[in-house]
Amino acid sequence: MPAAWADERTLLDAIRRGDRAAAEELVDRTYAALFASVCQLCGDRDVAADLTQETFRKAWVALPNFDGRSQLFTWLYRIAYTTFLNQIRRPRHLESLDDPDAADVQDEHPGADDVLAEQQEAARLRTAVMQLPEDLRFTVTAHFWGGLPIKEIAEIEKLTTVGIRKRLHRAFSILEVLLQEEEVTE
Amino acid sequence: MNSKRRAELQRRLSMGAVPRPPAGLAERIKADIPKYLDAGPVPQRFAWGTTMRIAATLITLATTALVTMELLQTDRKGAVQNSASKYERPTPAVLRYRTQPATQTASMPPAETEVSLDIAQELPAPAPVAPPQERRAEAANVSSGLIAATEAAPMQVADATLGAAAPAPPPPPPPMVAAPASAPPPARAVAAERASSELLEELPIGRIVTQAYATELDLEQRDVFGISLDPTAFPTIRTAIESGTRPAPDSVDVEALVNYFAGAQSSRRDVGLEVEVSPAPIAAEGDVALLRFTVDTAKLAVPARASVPPVARDAHLHIDIDTNAVASFRRIGDSGTEESEEALLYNTSVTGLYELKLKPNLRSSQRIATVRLQYVSVTSGRKQTLTRVIRGGDLAETWDRASRRHRLAALGAVWSETLRGPKGGVEIAQRAEELATQNPQDSRARELAAAATLSTGGER
C-alpha cells in the first residue's frame, strides 16, 4: 500500500483526481468485508458476489456526491444495503441454470451435519432479522454484520448514539419474540 | 428481556461465520472501474481555500475565548452556590416505613423481612378523592394525548395495607448525587469477561473482529430493571434544542430524561422504594394519573476508578395494577420494565412512571396498584420484601400537592414525549417554570423550565 494513501482521505482525494490505482486500492481494502456483510444479509454467496460488484459500480457513479463525513466503508455499506433491498423487493423470474438431470452429490465431509446446523441457525436468525422494521433492520445488520461502530451508524442515520442503542434494544426485544415463535412453531 | 437472553442474542448475531469472497471477485470489481473516474466537484468540505481556513481558525479562537470566559464566571457562581447548599439538610423522606413484627425469636433472625409502607404524611389531612368532574374542571382544556389503549392486568394479592393519605409537602431538593449508572455490576462484568474469553477461544480469527464490535455495544451499562439511566440523554437534547434543532424523535430517551429530572437520592436503608401517584401535570381527557416508583440504594463513598459494589442481589420488581380501579395504563418510555436485576449497586437511583387512566368514582380505599421489590441484602444475606400499596386516597388531590421529585419526574416525562411529536408543551413549560420559581436553588427545575420553554419554539 502506498504510504501516501495510508490516510483514507488522501486515498479518496487520489480517486477523485482519477488515480485508478487508488480506486483499486479502495477495492482491495473493502471488498472482502463488504462481501461478507452482504452474504450475511442474503445468505447466498453467488448473489452476494453480484451485489458486491453492483455496489462498487454504483459507488463509482456516486463518488462525486460523497461528502467524506462518514468512513468510506460506512458509505459503501449503505450503498450495498440499498442494493440488497432493491434486490429482494424486485420481482424475480429466475430459471435454474443447473442441469435438471444432474445427480445430487452428498457432502460426505466430516462435520457436514454441524455445518448444516450452523447454516440453519444462521438462516433462522436472518429470517427474523429481515422481519424487523426497516430502521431497526438496518441498524442491526449494519452493526453486527457490517461491523459498523455505533457512532458511524448514528452519523449516517443522523441520530445520537443513544438513539441507535435504543433501536438495538428494541430490535433485540422483537427478535427474541420472533425467534421464540419460530421455536414453538418447529 | 433479561440480560442473559440479550447476551445470548447478541452472541448469536455476532457469531455468524464470516464468508470469504470467491476467487476473482476483486478482479471483476476492478474491471468495472471507469476508465475516467469522474472527479466531479470537490465537496465543500475539502475545498476550503487558505483564506477561508484562516478566517475559520480566527472565528474558532475568538469563540473559544468567549466561551471559556463565560464558563469561568459560571463556575465561580456555581462554587458559591454549592458551598451554600452543602449546609442544607434535606427534610425527612416523603415516606415512613414500618417494619412488621417478626414472628421469629430474637436469636433466630427471620429469613425474610417484610417492610410495609405507611404512606401517612406529615402534611394536610387525608382528603377524599375529588370527583372526576372536579378534577377535570381543574385542568385546562388541553389534551395531553397520552393514553394508550392498554388493558390493565389483573391485580394480584397485595401484602400490606395503608392508611389513606394526602400527598407529601414539596421538600427542598437534596444535593444531587451523580448516580454511577454506567458502572456495570461486578457480577455482570465477570460474566461478560468470562463469556468473552470463551468466545475468543472458540472463534476462528475471522470472527473475532465482529465480536469486538459486539462488546462495543455497551447495552448493559446504563439501565437498571431495563430502565435507561443514560446520563448524556439530557445534555444531548439540550444541546440540540439550544442550537435550534428539534431532536429526532428516536433520539429522545424518555426514560433517561425521567431519571435525570427525578434525580438521585440515597436511601437510609440498603434499598428504599418510593411509590407515589398524582394527577397528570397537564390536562387530559378523563382521570389520568401518573404512578411513579423509585428505587434508591444506600450511599457509599467509592474511590475513583474503583467498581461500585452491590448492595443487593437477586432483585425482583413486581408492579400490579388493579383493573377494578384502572381502565387502562401504559409504561412511559420505550422499553418495558424488566422484573429482575442480578445486582443493585450502591449509589443507584432508578425511577419509572406509569400513566393510568382511572375509572370514575374511585373510592379512597380502592386499591390502585401494588409495587413489590424483593432482594437479598448483601450485608445481611437475608431476603427482603418491600411492598407499597397505593389506594385511591393516596392520589394527590391536585398536581401541586405531589412531592417535588414526583412533579419533576412527571414533567420531564411529559415534556420528553412532546419532543417526539409536533411542537407543543407550552403548559409543561409553564409548570416547570412554576417549579423553578418555587425553589430557585433547584438546578434541574431551572434546566427543565429553560429547555421546555425553548422547545415550544415560541408558542404561547
Image (cartoon, coloured by chain):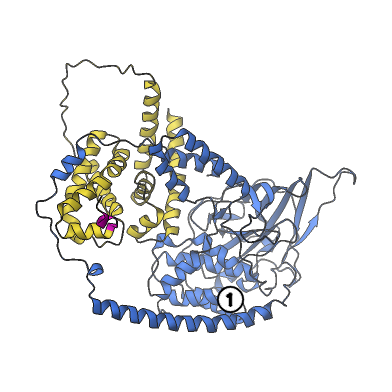
Chain colours: A yellow, B blue
The x, y position of residue B178, in whole percent, is 61, 65
Magenta span: chief secondary structure: helix
Examine the rendering and report whether any part of residue B2 can be seen: no
Q: Quadrant of the C terminus of chain A?
A: top left
Badge 1 element = helix
Q: Is residue B279 left or right of residue B274?
A: left
Q: Is residue B174 left or right of residue A121?
A: right
In this rendering, the answer to whether B161 lies above or below B41 is: above
The x, y position of residue B27, in whole percent, is 17, 40
Residue for badge 1: B443
- Does the stretch in magenta take in A4? yes
Query: Looking at the image, which is closer to me, A5 or A129?
Result: A5
Query: Looking at the image, which is closer to me, B12 or B350?
Result: B12
Residue at the extreme front of the image, as rendered: A3
Q: Chain of mark 1?
A: B
Q: Residue at x 16, y 32 (%)?
A: A94
The x, y position of residue A76, in whole percent, is 26, 51
The x, y position of residue A140, in whole percent, is 38, 47
- Does the stretch in magenta take in B224? no
Q: Label 1 amino acid? A: Ser
Query: Looking at the image, which is closer to me, B5 or B103?
Result: B5
In this rendering, the answer to whether B41 lies above or below A110 is: below
Examine the rendering and report whether any part of residue B272 can be seen: yes
Circle 1 crowding by C-alpha within 10 Å: few under 14, some 14–19, many from 20: some
In this rendering, the answer to whether B246 lies above or below B59 is: above
Question: What residue range appears in magenta?
Answer: A3-8
